[in-house]
Amino acid sequence: MKKCALLPLALLGLSLGLSAQTPAAPQTPPPPAAVAITDADLKNVEAPQPELRAKGDPDGALTGTVSDVAVSDSKKGLTIADVVNQVGQNKIAINFVWTLIAGFLVMFMQAGFAIVETGLCRAKNAGHTMMMNFMVYGVGMLAYWLIGFSLQMGGVGAVGNLGGSPVLNSEFAVTLFGKTFGLFGQNGFFLMHNGTYDVTVMVIFLFQMVFMDTTLTIVTGSAAERWKFAAFLVSSFLLGAFIYPLFANWAWGGGWLANLGANFGLGHGYVDFAGSGVVHSVGGLCALAMAIIIGPRIGKFDRQGRPTAIPGHDIALVLTGCFILAFGWFGFNPGSTLGASGNGNLRIGSVAVNTMLAGMAGGFGAMLYMWLRYGKPDASMSGNGLLAGLVAITAPCGFVNPVASVIIGLIAGVLVCLSVEFMERVMKVDDPVGAISVHGVNGLWGVISVGLFADGKSNYGGSWNGVSGSVTGLFYGDSGQLVAQLIGVSALIGVVFVIYFAANVLVDVVVGQRVGAKAELEGLDLPEVGVLCYPEFEIKSK
Amino acid sequence: MAAIGLIVTFLGFLLSLFSLSLASSNGARLGLVLAGIAVSLIGIIGIVNRAYLKNAIWKR
C-alpha cells in the first residue's frame, strides 16, 4: 500500500523536476569590472600591530604578511612593482627549492647503489665495492665540475623554470643534411667561465651532477669483485668528464637528438624526461663494455662455459638498498620538471605516481617470472625487477598515464630476468649485480616506450624541444616520435658503447683493468683498499 | 677482431643517422633505423664479445 501511495508523489516530484528545467537557466552574473590596483591601495594593507606580534604567533596568522614583502625604496613605500617582483621571486624560489631537494634525494641514491652492489657481492670484496661506490661520487663530481658540465649544458640556453638565465649559451655545432647538429657545449668550465657564476647555473649544476654520478655508479656493479681500483678511478673520470656529457648534451643540452623534431619533423625530437637513456642506458651500456673487457670472475663459468651461481653475501642490504633507490627516484623523476610552479609543472603528482606504479609492477613482474620458472620468488631478482621498472619509467614518466606506467613496469620486470639469463648463458658476460640488464636493457626499453605510450596529455608550457603541443607516441597517433626515440637508441648503442669501449681498452693497456688472480681469490679488500670490511669474519676463498 | 666489431657497431649508428636524409617517410626511416640497431647489436654481441670470449678466463 505504501508503495502505491508513494508512486504518485514520486511522479509529481519528477514532473516538478522536469518542469523546473523548462525555464531558461538563470544567467550567471557578469564578472565585476576589473579595477586596477594602485600603489595607494597597497598603503591600506595593514601590517600586524607590533604589540600583537610581540605576544607570539601560535596560530601563524601574523607571520608572512605585507610586512614581509621586500620594499625597494623606503621613501616610496610598498609599490605594485615590489609586489610583482615578489611574486616572480616566489615562483623561482619554489622551483629552486623543489629542484635542489630533488637533487639531494638523487644524491642519496648513491648510498642505495652502494649497499645494493655490496650486498650482491661476496663478503671478501665488500670493502672494495663500498669504496668504489664512495669514491665514484668524488671523482665523478671533480670530472664534471672541471669539464663535463660545460660539455653537457654549456649551450642549453635559458631554463625558464629556473629564472631564464641566458649565460649557458655556447654550443659547438656542425651542419649535416642542411641542418644544425649541436654536438657539445662550450660554456661553464669550473662554474666560473663566461658569467656562469650564477644562481641558476648552480642549481642546474647540482641537479645534473647527481644524475651523472648515478651513471658512473652503474659501471662499478658490472665490474665488481675484479676491477683494479686505480683503473676504476681513471675510467670513471673519463666517463664523467667526456662520455656521459656528450650524450647528455645531445638529449638535454640542446644537441642534435633533441632537435630531431624541429629539424626533421620527428615528433618532439628525442624525448627522455628523466634519463632512461641519458643516465641508465649510458651507464648500462658502459657496464656491458667494461664487463666484456674485464672478463668474468674466476669460477663464474666452468670449463664448458656453463654459468655457476655466485650468491651475494647480504640480501638484507640488497633489498634495503632497493628501498633507498625507490625513495631517491622521487627526486629523480618528479624533480626533472625543474620546478613545481608554472609551465604545467603541477604534473609532478602524475610523474610521482607513475614512478611508484612502474616500480611496483617491475617488482611483481620479476617475482612472478622467477616463481613460475624456478619455483621460488627470487629475492634479489625481485629487487632488480623493482629497479628495472623504475629505470624503464624514467624516460616516459612525464608523458604517460598510470595504466601505461604499470604495463611499462611489468614488461621491465620480466625483461630484466630474460636479459640476465641472456647475458649469462648466451653472451657469457659476468655481471655480478645485473647492472647491464637493469639499467642498460631497461633503459633502452624506457626510451622506446615514450615513442609508444606517450598519450599527448602533458603540457609543459605548451611545447617540448621547441616543438609545440604535447609529446605523443605511436599508440596515440605519432609514429615520428618512435623513430626519434629509436635514433636515440641507435646513438646509445653505436656511439656511447664504442667510445667507452675504445677508451677503456686504452686504460687497460696503460693501467690494467683487472686485478691479479691471487688478489681476486683472496678478496680485494686488503690488496686494493687496505681494509677488511668484516675483520672479525672468517672469509673462505672459493 | 674486436676493433672490427667496434667499427661495425658504429656503422650501425651511421645507417640510422643517414635514414634522416635517405628517406622522408616515417615508415622508411623506421625500417632503416631498426636495421642500423640490428647491425650495431651484431657488432657487439656477434663480433666484439666473441673476440673477447676466445681468451676467456674459464677456457685457460
Image (cartoon, coloured by chain):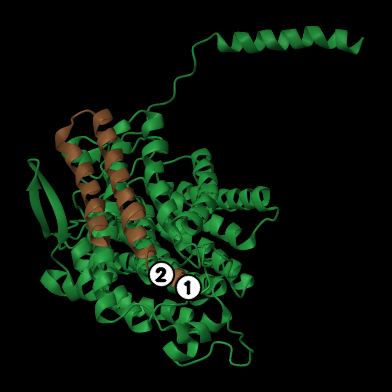
Judge whether A520 appears above or below A471 on screen: below
Q: Quadrant of residue A76?
A: bottom left
- Name the quadrant of the C terminus of chain A: bottom right
Q: Quadrant of residue A335?
A: bottom left
Disc assigned to residue A295: 2
Q: Could you tell me how far apart the alpha carbons at marks 1 and 2 are, in whole angstroms?
A: 7 Å
Q: Chain of mark 1?
A: A
Comparing A385 with A375, the one in front is: A375
Comparing A222 with A82, the one in front is: A222
Q: Is residue A347 left or right of residue A250?
A: right
Q: Residue furthest right?
A: A1
- Name the quadrant of the N terminus of chain A: top right
Visible in this render: residue A296?
no
Judge whether A259 appears above or below A326 on screen: above
The residue tagged 1 is: A297
To the question of a shared chain for discs 1 and 2, the answer is yes
Q: Residue at x 36, y 50 (%)?
A: A273
Q: Residue at x 66, y 53 (%)?
A: A374
Residue A201 image point, x, y percent: 23, 66
Q: Is residue A64 left or right of residue A71?
A: right
SS type, badge 2? loop
Judge whether A141 appears above or below A430 on screen: below
SS type, badge 1? loop
Judge whether A212 appears above or below A356 on screen: below
The hue of chain A in the figure is green
Q: Residue at x 47, y 46 (%)?
A: A350
